[in-house]
Image (cartoon, grey):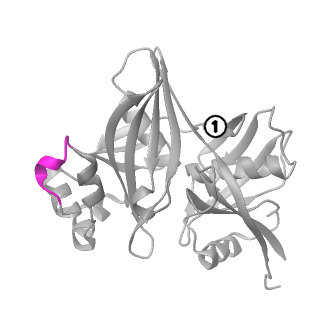
Amino acid sequence: MAEYFLLDVFADRAFAGNPLAVFPRAEGLATDTMQAIANELNLSETVFVGEATGWHRYPVRIFTPTRELPFAGHPVIGTAHLLVELSMAERDRSLTLDAGVGPLVVEFDRTLASFTTAAPFSISSSTLNQTAVAQLLGLAAQQTLSEPVLASCGLPYHLIELASQEALERARPSPSAWAEWVSPSGHDQVYLYVVGKETGASRVVRARMFSTEGGVREDSATGSAAAALAGHLAQNRRVGRWRWQIEQGIEMGRPSRILAEAERAEDDLTIRIAGEAVIVGRGSLHLPG
């Protein structure tokens, strides 16, 4: 029997945010078993937590239904919240989750968990251009504000800035255009965003993320994409700190809120992602054996 918990991440209530399954005591499970479980549960990601390797330090492995990921944001936030709820970690101490991308240090502040990205921000040219984006999303070319880029903090995304919230809502990725323009890059993740107004100390961003998992599908909250976007928005700025409140999942009926922060000190760029999570269920799987 393998016990797991279901959480909704980047949300403060059930049936919002991004669903996540976490197996908090997964030591001894083989890689192919983890992949089979993730496929069985068919959520965007499933996390397997290994035996503690030190004080407040755990290895984690993250799987989609079809592959293992080196890094993903909502699994880190959700796992951190769960470990505190299970008394496997304490809210007043930092927690380290060792993922494929490296150590992710998590801090807690009231209802928020936040982590600092482990991989350095990187950016390069995208296989997409504004004409291709129009074909891909079924929009007019002028509804894309700039040339797309490929950005990453451990998992690459094609970042596409759109001119309006209306364009964001209307976007409908074409599978044939995806196969022509996105898949040749080897990075089948596209993040659409619209930069909105300032609210308090942060600026509001509306976003949508699409990837290929059994066809083109949408994700309701994507912390790794938010990290890449924060790096992109901050890359040409001078010393300082900037914050964004990223709203995602609204078109899916699963509103999510991701808090992203970028801080530059000289040549160093630090990116942090924060969010809430709620436990919505628990269960167990009968494993063959």
Position of residue 64 measured from the top left corner of the image (x, y, whole percent): 56, 66
Position of residue 242 measured from the top left corner of the image (x, y, whole percent): 45, 24
Q: Quadrant of the N terminus?
A: bottom right
Residue 71 visible within the image:
no
Position of residue 247 measured from the top left corner of the image (x, y, whole percent): 45, 46
Within-10-Å neighbours for mark 1: few <14, some 14–19, many 20+: many
Position of residue 181 measured from the top left corner of the image (x, y, whole percent): 23, 62
Q: Exactly how many numbered labels are in the figure?
A: 1
Q: Which residue is mark 1?
A: 114
Identified by mark 1, the residue type is Ser
Seen as rendered, the residue at the extreme bottom is 288
SS of the residue at dot 1?
strand
Residue occupying the point 68% across, 36% down: 105
Residue occupying the point 71% across, 45% down: 97
Residue occupying the point 81% across, 32% down: 92
Left or right: 230, with 49 as reference point? left
Q: Was residue 96 drawn as part of the magenta stretch in this picture?
A: no
Q: Was residue 142 drawn as part of the magenta stretch in this picture?
A: yes
Task: Please tell me whether residue 185 is drawn above or below residue 269 in the rendered image.
Answer: below
User: What is the magenta range?
Assistant: 139-147
Task: Please tell me whether residue 15 is drawn above or below residue 284 in the rendered image.
Answer: above
Left or right: 281, with 215 as reference point? right
Task: Please tell me whether residue 90 is drawn above or below residue 168 in the rendered image.
Answer: above
* Viewer-proximal residue among 58 and 184: 58
Residue 100 visible within the image:
yes
Residue occupying the point 46% across, 14% down: 266
